[in-house]
Image (cartoon, rainbow, N blue to C red):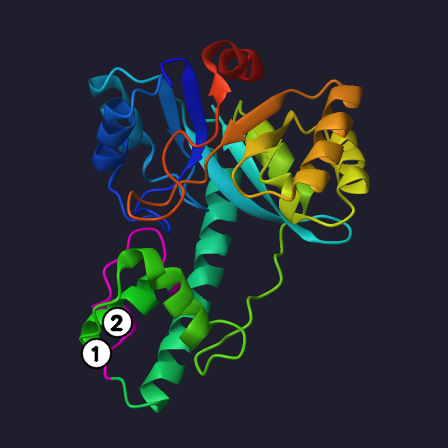
Amino acid sequence: MYNLVDMQTHSWYSDGTDSPEELMRHASHRGLAGVVITDHSVMDHWDESLFYAKRFQLISTTGIELYARASTQEVHLLGYGMKHTPELARICKEQCDQHNRRARQIIERYKKRGFDFCFEDIPHKGYLARFQIAQFVAKRIDTPVPVVDMHSRSDKYGGVGGFAAVPAEPIPHSTKEVIDAIHEGGGRVSLAHPGEYGNVEDLIVELDEQDIDGIECRSKKKDLDIVRKACNMAWGLGLPITGGSDYHGSRFRIQLGDAGVSRDDFFHFLH
């Protein structure tokens, strides 16, 4: 792993369980060359993440994952190497506000079932994630559910068919809007986990026309046939390949370094 840079990870600033310090220490112990924390819709972790990357002698840069609306579906876009800008701050605030509105609605549904807690009772950073609500509820009802099962618990209560289920609001930001905002901040943009999308070939053509910089073909979240199509499209269009594990914490199934790119590929993508 000494030549591997994991380009998609998440800390407790969004929906992960590790602090940036814990995440960087863990990456160092696993022998990674580098890691980028790409928390959803927040930039607050950047200084802390880069500080601990330097302390543990890891390659890194600023990172973010933003939700975006393509012509036929919603997608996730990864940004790398950008700086704070008013436009990025606006998009992040609007997306965090969406998360928090949904979280408050979910909590109201728990209250109707007799649970006694409020939004402010649950520790969180940039926004309150559904997973964090599920974890809090599990502790409140004194149910010894391992952290690794928290996403399934979230699905049981707050997912489709669950009594606390609340549909996500439509994403207001277009892919072009997000790509342009990251570019304005001096960053580069990659399509996250392409194996999760339908009509991936048409999607990549659309994003290429909007000047996307790469495709995350090295990913643990994938349908192999779709990823193969995505890789072929990326190569045909001359788009660099990025890679990341989508790590959310050491007690989940996906671990740091389960996917990534070489040092050379990482620096080639950034420059």
Q: Quadrant of the C terminus?
A: top right
- Residue type, label 1: Ile
Picture residue at 49% right of the left edge, 27% below the top: 80
- Determine if residue 187 is in view: yes
Residue 112 sits above or below residue 2 on the image: below
* Residue 44 percent coordinates (x, y): 33, 40
- Determine if residue 176 is in view: no
Q: Main secondary structure of the magenta part?
A: loop
Residue 148, magenta (yes or no) = no
Q: Is residue 95 left or right of residue 10?
A: right
Picture residue at 53% right of the left edge, 40% below the top: 87
Picture residue at 35% right of the left edge, 82% below the top: 110
Q: Are marks 2 and 1 in contact (CB under 8 Å)?
A: yes
- Alpha carbons under labels 2 and 1: distance apart: 5 Å
The front one of 143 and 199 is: 143
* Residue 81 percent coordinates (x, y): 47, 23
- How packed mark 1 is, by other alpha carbons closer than 10 Å (few <14, some 14-19, many 20 or more), is few
Which of the 4 quarters of the picture holds residue 223?
top right
Give me the disc on residue 220: none
- Residue type, label 2: Ala
Q: Find numbered disc 1 in the image and state the secondary structure of the residue it sits on.
A: loop
- How packed mark 2 is, by other alpha carbons closer than 10 Å (few <14, some 14-19, many 20 or more), is some
Q: Find numbered disc 2 in the image and state the secondary structure of the residue it sits on.
A: helix
Residue carrying label 1: 141
Which of the 4 quarters of the picture holds residue 56?
top left
Residue carrying label 2: 138
Magenta range is 116-130
* Residue 232 percent coordinates (x, y): 76, 27
Picture residue at 76% right of the left edge, 41% below the top: 203
